[in-house]
Amino acid sequence: MQVYLVGGAVRDHLLGHPYHEKDYVVVGATPEQLLSEGYQPVGKDFPVFLHPKTKEEYALARTERKSGMGYHGFQFFTDTTVKLEEDLIRRDLTINAMAMDDSGKVYDPYGGQKDLDHKILRHVSYAFTEDPLRVLRVARFAARYASYGFRIADETLQLMKDIAQSGELNALTPERVWKETSRALMEDHADLYFQTLKDCDALKILFPEIDDLFGVPQRPEYHPEIDCGIHTLMALKQACVANYPLEVRFAVLVHDLGKALTPVDELPRHILHEERGIQPVTEISDRLKVPTYLKNLALIVCKEHLKCHQVKNLKPGTLWRLLQRLDVLRRPEKVLAFVQACECDAKGRLGLEDRPYPQAQYILDAMEIVRNIRAQDLPDHIQGAEIGEMLIQYRIEALAKFKEQHTD
């Protein structure tokens, strides 16, 4: 029995990129051998075991054969005769098809180290086309390693196009698509994930609402980049630069979906695009089974982001009602996430990436003002239902004074 560290841990070790998970492949062993040594079985499709102490994954060396559509359409074969090279050749990219033994010796039968040196994301074999999930994985790797200068090999990008055109992407489950996408959204260059999917014709299949934004014009005085799709990716890039959390990044990604529904005769203006965006944001969130808290923030950013941009012109009562819809008294963190997403929208424009966005601090200051007005601050004779009404009055009056102090 021989044990090798494989996949991402070897790749990132050689690249000098931080990693946490370690996966191992076991050559020349049977399930019974691992069970006798205390390993715990976890794999449904093929034998995978957890180490009795470290709980890291150990998989028996295996080969596979395509037997159906989609990510699960494979038959796996494990045996003590399966060689390390046979196990590695079924992997997606050459840089993921390397192994390392416990002495640090690297086994690289398919040129992974060369591609690592040349910053190339290249498929190992034509079997790459058998798994549609690899389109998302390669797009995610493109986003993750962009800062190192990696690019996708032309022939690999062509295979990704072939997969998109084959209809195999439709076999991916929503859960799997969202899992890859949510991970990609947290990369430093998440915008390149979606750009890569567009480049290989997968965006229109998996994210048609986003794909529809490309080619839609906007008024150049507000959006020098003009194209709605380009603006969306620029805004997402701002969220990455600021290292904002997943909920903010998703909200930024979908904040302008309504612009794809603007009647042609109204272009390049986008009147009521906030209201038009509610349906596509709901549809993409429900289809991908996006967590509810992400969907809720995305919806309110879609509907209210123009109010954030114009907040200094809002009447005190209008600002209070906006803060109420953001659940200001119970969830101040939601207000923060809202203004962060709106700031990304404002800065995700050609040549305007570094402009200040004082609206963010204005809303956060307003939030603190209304949160600091409590029932105990009211006169003693205010009782019952009058308490809620008087609190609203006090808060709006306080916002009026705040507005006066910030009038230019």
Image (spheres, rainbow, N blue to C red):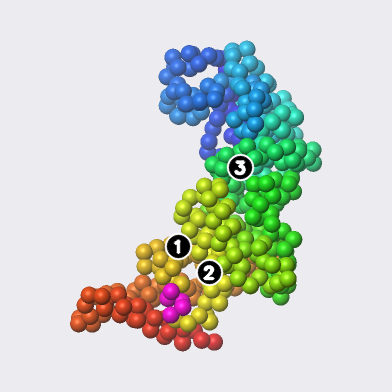
- Residue beneath label 1, please? 334
> Disc 1 marks which amino acid?
Lys
Residue 120 x/y as whole percent: 74, 40
Which label belongs to residue 101? none
- What is the distance, in whole Å, between disc 2 and disc 1 at their CAs? 13 Å
Which label belongs to residue 304? 2
Q: Judge whether 100 appears above or below 230 on screen.
A: above
Q: State yes or no: discs 2 and 3 in contact (Cβ < 8 Å).
A: no
Q: Is residue 287 magenta?
A: no
> Disc 2 marks which amino acid?
Glu
Prevailing SS of the magenta stretch? helix
Relative side of 218 to 6, left or right: right
Residue segment shown in magenta: 317-321
Q: Judge whether 8 appears above or below 49 on screen.
A: below
Quadrant where the C terminus sits is: bottom right
Nearer to me, 197 or 186? 197
Which residue sits at x=51%, y=67%?
A: 339
Q: Is tag 2's residue or tag 1's residue first in the polypeptide sequence?
A: 2
Residue 83 x/y as whole percent: 65, 17
Farthest right residue in view: 154
- Residue beneath label 3, please? 17
Farthest left residue in view: 381
